[in-house]
Image (tube, rainbow, N blue to C red):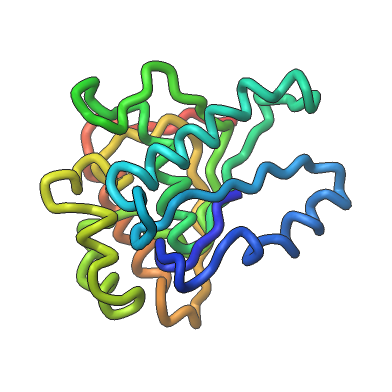
Amino acid sequence: MVHGGCWSAATADREQLRHLGAELVQYGIAIWSIGCRRANEAGGGYPGTYLDVGAAIDRAREDAPRYRLDLARTVLVGHSAGGHLALWAASRGALPASSPLHAPSPFTSCAVISLDGVGDLREFARFVPLHCGSGILEQLAPSEALGEVSPAALQPATAIVLVSGVLDRLVPPGVAHDYTRALRTAPGRAAPPC
């Protein structure tokens, strides 16, 4: 699980999804709730935030035997800004080797569930300063790196489920439609089923 909060230390942290994690544990689902440096924290933004997310997700593979995790049944869930990071993580295998975000063998989950997440950061960029404050976008996605951090610009390596709230004023369903449209119009994109 990747929490939301405008990619900002001033908004939210892992506590945001604690109730969801506790509920899922009641059904026998193991939860791996990750944190990362936010865009307005020292070392956060590009590339720090993305490196943190990638390292946390890749660590599941390392710790799976210890916790008896079945990695073939792993689903990555992210809310809002965390949805963006979860979608990015599912697509990071498409990063060029020259990218500072490139990992030689990134862990890929069976699916990603994005709860009001931002999949097309290019389309959503104009709203980030309005919702999250000034400076966040510039730290998170400098213009020269936008193709490396916008999930819509990358090839997803897993099944994607998008969930949007009709009354959500910050990340309305149109944001999910932008991402879906970008994936449908890109040549050769097909996510494997779980």
Where 122 falls versus 170 (above or below)?
above
Q: Is residue 194 left or right of residue 167?
A: right
Residue 94 percent coordinates (x, y): 30, 28
Picture residue at 80% right of the left edge, 57% below the top: 22
Residue farthest left in this picture: 144
All told, the count of numbered labels is 0
Residue 6 percent coordinates (x, y): 41, 67
Where 95 falls versus 33 (above or below)?
above
Picture residue at 50% right of the left edge, 37% below the top: 159
Q: Is residue 63 left or right of residue 134?
A: right
Where 193 falls versus 20 (above or below)?
above
Residue 140 percent coordinates (x, y): 28, 55
Residue farthest front in this picture: 42
Q: Is residue 42 left or right of residue 160?
A: left
Can the viewer see residue 180? no
Which sits in the foreground, 187 or 176? 176
Which sits in the foreground, 73 or 48? 48
Can the viewer see residue 13? yes
Q: Quadrant of residue 170?
A: bottom left
Picture residue at 22% right of the left edge, 29% below the top: 99
Which sits in the foreground, 156 or 148? 148
Picture residue at 51% right of the left edge, 54% below the top: 114
Residue 80 percent coordinates (x, y): 47, 63
Image quarter in which the C terminus is found:
top right
